[in-house]
Amino acid sequence: TKQQKKMYVSPPVSSCLSGWFLARKKLCNKIGLYGDVPESLRRIEKFLNTQIEFHELDLLDKPGLEKIFIKHSFYAVMHFAGLKAVGESVEQPLRYYRVNLTGTIDLLEVMQSHGVRNLVFSSSATVYGDPQKLPIDEQHPVGGCTNPYGKTKYFIEEMIRDQCTAEKDWNAVLLRYFNPIGAHISGQIGEDPQGIPNNLLPYVAQVAIGRRKHLNVFGNDYSTPDGTGVRDYIHVVDLAKGHIAAVRKLKDNCGCKVYNLGTGTGYSVLQMVNAMEKASGRKIAYQIAPRRSGDVASCYADPTLAEKELGWKAEYGLERMCEDLWRWQSQNPTGFSKGTQP
């Protein structure tokens, strides 16, 4: 009802929703879920014994958004929706600009017209471009993005920042993710890419389970210890807890704040392959391929500001991330589909 305050969430949200409820302290009465994730939603409801209201809607469907905001009164929006593959964005830049930018503008306008002034945005470390220094803190220059995906995240950050400046009752927390991996410890909630995975660890897991023949390692001539790209990997459960902390920050009328969500430690592609071999007990075949356009050599966070201002710090290390990912993949060889064989 209009009297109830709700949180409006866009995908991917499985781990975030689980973390939300597992925090054991509800910050709102209900959660409205947007996104085409019926099986993951069903599992979350069963796991938590909680019914979640669900609306399947394209973010570019502005009239549809209006109907949802007319029907419900929301305290805040957690905005995850958008296209997110670096390589694909280089090949399809206009599609990325249309979906990510237009969709966000529509969402912000609907929020504005319905008096919703609190926002948590899923940003990305790609806004930093090719790092000038490591580790990367929030004062590092942004905007020198190496791919259209990163540019959309940077442009959206600027939109939100400008809106918070123009309307002083707006509050936003921009969370710059590094590289989320892992899965819920139950093995029932995890990442299920549609088609060929664009991220490293889901692809590695599918090779380990037998769905893919081998991993393509894009470049082994970077200025890194083993020549492969180095990234900061963060457990999705830690990421979910970061969102809980961010919503609490909104209650302080914080204006527009930016935080890195990472561990502060970088691992190379080959180190990640070795870690997944250990977790799965299986050999993971790989071959070296040319570099991908838009990739950088190394990127890892200085997450101290989030610890200082949000009281948040990543708890899980690489071994746990890979163990949880393998538990999910081995229990769900074909993801959320009903099949049981790779």
Image (tube, helix red, strand yellow):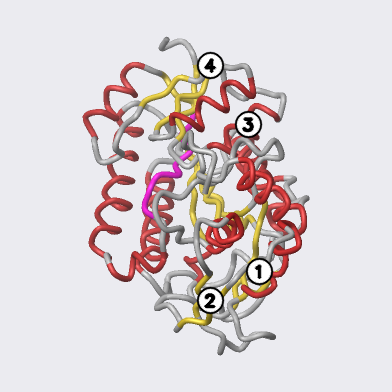
Element carrying mark 3: helix
Query: Disc 1 to disc 3, how far (Cα)?
Result: 31 Å
Q: Are marks 2 and 3 in contact (CB under 8 Å)?
A: no
Q: Is residue 85 left or right of residue 246?
A: left
| Residue 294: quadrant of the picture | bottom left
Which residue shows up at 52% across the image and 49% down it? 342
Residue corresponding to mark 3: 20
The image position of residue 131, as x and y in percent, is 56, 77
Residue corresponding to mark 2: 217
The image position of residue 26, as x and y in percent, is 64, 23
Element carrying mark 2: strand
Query: Disc 2 to disc 4, how far (Cα)?
Result: 42 Å
The image position of residue 60, as x and y in percent, is 25, 41
Element carrying mark 1: helix
Q: Is residue 118 visible?
A: no
Which residue shows up at 68% across the image and 53% down it? 306
Mark drawn on residue 51? 4
Q: Earlier in the sequence, mark 4 or mark 1?
A: 4
Magenta residue span:
76-83
Query: Disc 4 to disc 1, how far (Cα)?
Result: 38 Å
